[in-house]
Image (cartoon, rainbow, N blue to C red):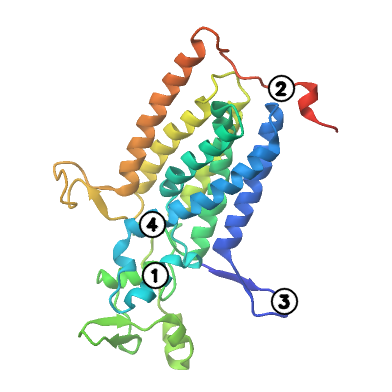
């Protein structure tokens, strides 16, 4: 866990791992969409602009989704209204839900493509592998930041997080770990909480005690998600080069992402919103927000797969997408 990778030389400006990974993910995905757009005979600059729109709307949607999913973390009475609002806006702390970003970025980017007269299904196919590639870097950022951690485990590759990390705070709140008394403080309401990391760092005794503390061992769920996203990006890119009905690459992304995210969610710790323990449809197994969305994603992908195939076989439509652009679309060099 390294939220701050380094400081810019001769300055006190920190470079945050999460933010750097977001930038690298955007740059990598832009390169991929430009390559696929040129291959399809489309203007790559339209997709660069579309990628920027997707980035901004995606971050907004992902942050709002994370806040709603974990609203108790942003309604701390000890912080007050202003303090909670600052926490909501603090992207440096991590906390972006992929599905929330996708649900907002998809219609916004689709509208932009429609305005630019991009063949929408082909445009969706071009964006699909890039979405997964950007997620690769996003999950590395999560790992560096310590957010989106996994469930407790005892596997050889388990990881643990330092004092005052998200995992440590949650494990303390659940009564699973007990810090030394020196690292505890009593609040005005009589409850006990742990001393913030910045305060502990200013006291040599507390700093030494905090350095010995860590969370329980957990799954490196962020790295599982990273490898999953990398594999999906490769599969979708390969499928893009094969003859297929336009739109089916995007549909395949929905299907595969829905399946894999549902399975990976079993190795994470998220509150139940449906099924046992949620107060809703208690006869069902406990399912988190992301599990529910994964099911919707899978079903939506199946529907799109067959709908796009039937549409392409209808009179007046090609059954396959063009794989190689015309010479005039390739540009010089």
* Residue found farthest to the top: 315
Q: To which residue does mark 1 refer?
A: 85
Horizontal and vertical percent position of residue 136:
55, 48
The residue that label 2 is drawn on is: 324
**Of label 4 and label 3, which has the lower sequence position?**
3
Task: Specify few, some or many for label 4: CA neighbours under 10 Å numbering under 14, 14-19, or 20 or more.
Answer: many
Residue neighbourhood size for the residue with mark 2, other residues' Cα within 10 Å, grouped as few (<14), some (14–19), many (≥20): some
Between the residue at mark 2 and the residue at mark 4, the CA separation in whole angstroms equals 41 Å
Q: CA distance from mark 4 to mark 3?
A: 34 Å
Q: Which numbered disc, 4 or 1, marks the residue closer to the eye?
A: 1
Give the residue at mark 4.
66
Q: Residue at the location (51% across, 14% down)?
A: 312
**157 above or below 293?**
below
Closest to the camera, between mark 1 and mark 2, is 1
Gap between marks 4 and 1, in whole Å?
A: 14 Å
Q: Residue at the spot x=42%, y=32% of the render?
A: 255
**Residues at circles 1 and 2 in contact by the CB criterion of under 8 Å:** no
Most foreground residue, 162 or 138: 138
Nearer-N-terminus badge (4/1): 4
Whichever of labels 3 and 2 marks the residue nearer the N terminus, that label is 3
Where in the figure is residue 154, as x and y percent of width and height?
36, 58
- Residue 263 horizontal side relative to residue 207, left or right: left
Instruction: Residue 314: give x, y in percent of width and height.
Output: 48, 9
Q: CA distance from mark 1 to mark 2?
A: 50 Å
Residue drawn 73% across and 80% down? 10
Q: Quadrant of the C terminus?
A: top right
Tell me how far mark 3 sits from mark 2, CA to CA.
Answer: 46 Å
- Tell me the number on the disc at residue 280: none
Marks 1 and 3, how far apart at CA: 32 Å
Disc on res. 9:
3
Q: Mark 4 and 3 residues: CB-CB less than 8 Å, in contact?
A: no
Relative side of 216 to 108, left or right: left
């Amino acid at each position: 866990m390294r939220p701050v990778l380094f400081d810019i030389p001769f300055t006190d400006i920190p470079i945050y791992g999460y933010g750097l990974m977001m930038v690298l993910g955007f740059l990598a995905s832009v390169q991929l969409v430009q390559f696929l757009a040129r291959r399809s005979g489309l203007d790559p600059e339209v997709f660069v602009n579309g990628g920027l729109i997707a980035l901004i709307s995606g971050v907004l949607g992902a942050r709002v989704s994370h806040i709603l999913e974990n609203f108790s973390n942003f309604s701390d009475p000890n912080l007050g209204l202003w303090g909670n609002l600052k926490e909501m806006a603090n992207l440096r702390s991590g906390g972006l839900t992929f599905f929330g970003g996708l649900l907002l970025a998809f219609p916004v980017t689709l509208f932009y493509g429609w305005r630019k007269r991009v063949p929408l299904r082909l445009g969706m196919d071009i964006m699909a592998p890039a979405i997964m590639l950007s997620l690769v870097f996003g999950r590395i950022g999560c790992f560096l930041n310590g957010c989106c951690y996994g469930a407790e485990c005892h596997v050889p590759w388990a990881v643990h997080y330092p004092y005052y990390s998200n995992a440590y705070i949650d494990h303390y709140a659940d009564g699973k770990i007990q810090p030394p008394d020196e690292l505890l403080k009593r609040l005005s309401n009589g409850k006990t909480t742990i001393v913030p990391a910045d305060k502990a760092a200013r006291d040599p005794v507390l700093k030494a005690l905090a350095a010995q503390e860590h969370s329980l061992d957990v799954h490196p769920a962020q790295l599982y998600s990273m490898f999953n996203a990398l594999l999906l990006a490769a599969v979708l890119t390969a499928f893009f080069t094969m003859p297929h009905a336009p739109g089916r690459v995007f549909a395949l992304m929905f299907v595969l992402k829905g399946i894999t995210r549902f399975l990976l969610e079993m190795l994470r710790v998220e509150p139940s919103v449906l099924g046992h323990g949620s107060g809703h449809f208690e006869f069902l197994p406990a399912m988190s927000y992301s599990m529910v969305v994964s099911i919707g994603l899978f079903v939506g992908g199946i529907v799109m797969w067959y709908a796009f195939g039937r549409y392409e076989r209808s009179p007046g439509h090609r059954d396959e997408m063009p794989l190689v652009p015309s010479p005039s679309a390739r540009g010089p060099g």
